Amino acid sequence: MHTGGMRWALPILAMTIVSTAGATPDGLIDDFRSDTGPSRLGTTWRLVTDQVMGGVSTARMQRRELGGRRALCMTGDVSLANNGGFVQINLALSPEGRLDASAFTGVRLSVRGNGEIYNLHLKTAATTMPWQSYRAAFRALDTWTEIRLPFASFTPHRLVPALDTTRLTRLGIVAIGREMRADLCIADIGFYR
């Protein structure tokens, strides 16, 4: 991935932090209660790094308990060498290919991290190239925090159409665009109304 000196700065102003108490399972994508196996949608999380494009970033994905919560964790190092610059964990949102999330307002996730800024990427039927996505940024604090990212806060990256929530295909949690240590755990993720 060629960055051409461009930094992947996304505003994090649209982020809302709320208490994790009383969070509803409505719209739940995954809560990582199982040590193995698929998400609540029946699809499997996978780890992808820029090595698929010749980069040298490294990462590891594992399920573990952290602060009394089961979580999926991504750790690694993002390097810009060899035109690289990302590590991510991602999930197909439907075994059938597309998911209609138009009844919801956005994506919520309970995260704990190292204080770095991460991205949540959404893909739709319109994102035909690997580098295309709809992106929103959030900061992962060192305590469990629920983040709410409204669909309206997702910006298109290298594509023109606006986000169509009736045609979602994939979701990714990404450390991207700058040299950094990735250390992020997710205890649950889903859509909210």
Image: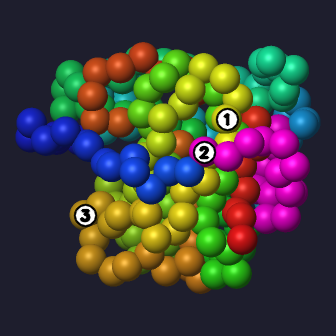
* Left or right relative to 123: residue 11: left
Q: Position of residue 1 (x, y in %)?
A: 23, 41
Identified at 32% across, 55% down, the residue is 131
How many C-alpha atoms fall within 10 Å of the one at disc 2: few (<14), some, or many (≥20)?
Answer: some
Q: Quadrant of residue 130?
A: bottom left
Q: Residues under labels 1 and 3: Cα distance?
A: 30 Å
Q: Residue furthest left?
A: 4
Q: Residue furthest right?
A: 34
What is the basis of the colouring in this image? rainbow
Please name the amino acid that badge 2 sits on.
Answer: Ile
Q: Residues under labels 2 and 1: Cα distance?
A: 7 Å
Which mark is drawn over residue 27?
Answer: none
Q: SS class of the residue under badge 3?
A: loop
Cβ–Cβ under 8 Å for marks 2 and 1: yes
Stretch in magenta: 17-32
Which mark is drawn over residue 17?
Answer: 2
In this rendering, is residue 67 above or below 193?
above
Identified at 28% across, 35% down, the residue is 177
Identified at 52% across, 19% down, the residue is 114
Identified at 66% across, 53% down, the residue is 108
Q: SS class of the residue under badge 1?
A: strand
Overall secondary structure of the magenta stretch? loop
Marked residue nearer the N-terminal end (3 or 2): 2
In this rendering, is residue 172 above or below 63?
below
Magenta-span inclusion, residue 101: no
